[in-house]
């Protein structure tokens, strides 16, 4: 029986939601902020489907740190972006990722949520290091990088 998990982190970005959303809905922009993009500089990346938004696909194949998997944008609304995440290596898993963007005057509250079910292999690893500890710090790093990229883009647009 699979065991569900949910990990979330949040931050405030001094930029409007559309600036943040632009970085989320275009997988080519993820290299600017994703905490996992620099795990393997030689990683093979493939982009297909739509250029951005629903139907955009991203696949990667990297070393043992980066693994291999795919992402697809399954939801794209002004205040929410949803992504289906599938790993093939280091072990198969499926997760749902959501970015919730809440406008607050001249800022955006960003919540990044990852949900899924622990596979038997993931359950073994989670005994040593729970999902919260495994991906939480990476999500925090990614949110700092996302904030910096969105604020840089917003400053350049002025």
Image: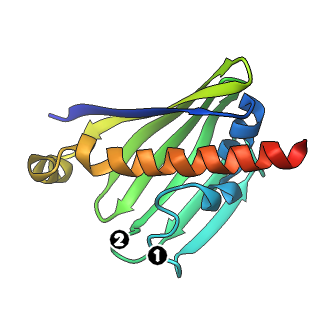
Q: Position of residue 3 (x, y in %)?
A: 19, 33
The number of discs equals: 2
For the residue carrying disc 1, how many other residues have a C-alpha within 10 Å: few (<14), some (14-19), or many (20+)?
A: some
Residue under the point 39% across and 52% down: 138
Residue 153 located left or right of residue 64: right
Q: Which residue is disc 2 drawn over?
A: 65
SS assignment at label 2: loop
Residue 68: percent from the left, percent from the top? 43, 66
Residue at the image position 65 percent from the left and 27 percent from the top? 108
- Asked whether 79 or 93 is in front, the reply is 79
Query: Pointer 1 and pointer 2: residues touching (CB < 8 Å)?
Result: yes
Mark 1 lies on a secondary structure that is: loop
Q: CA distance from mark 1 to mark 2?
A: 7 Å
Q: Quadrant of the image for the C terminus?
A: top right
Out of 93 and 22, give the one closest to the viewer.
22
Residue 105 appearing in the image: yes
Q: Which mark is residue 109?
A: none
Instruction: Give the labeled residue for mark 1.
Output: 40
Whether residue 112 is visible: no
Query: How is the protein colored in the picture?
Result: rainbow
Locate the N terminus by quadrant: top left
Judged left or right of residue 87, residue 2 is left
């Amino acid at each position: 029986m699979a065991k569900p998990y949910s990990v979330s982190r949040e931050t405030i970005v001094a930029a409007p939601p559309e600036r943040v959303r632009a970085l989320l809905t275009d997988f080519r922009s993820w290299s600017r902020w994703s905490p996992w993009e620099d795990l393997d500089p030689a990683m093979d990346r493939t982009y297909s489907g739509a250029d951005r938004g629903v139907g955009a696909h991203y696949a990667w194949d990297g070393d043992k740190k980066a693994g291999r998997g795919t992402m697809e944008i399954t939801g794209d609304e002004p205040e929410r972006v949803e992504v289906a995440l599938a790993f093939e290596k280091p072990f198969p898993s499926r997760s749902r990722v959501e970015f919730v963007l809440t406008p607050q005057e001249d800022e955006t509250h960003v919540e990044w949520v990852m949900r899924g079910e622990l596979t038997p292999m993931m359950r073994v690893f989670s005994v040593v290091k729970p999902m919260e500890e495994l991906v939480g710090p990476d999500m925090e790093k990614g949110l700092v990088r996302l904030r910096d990229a969105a604020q840089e883009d917003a400053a350049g647009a002025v």
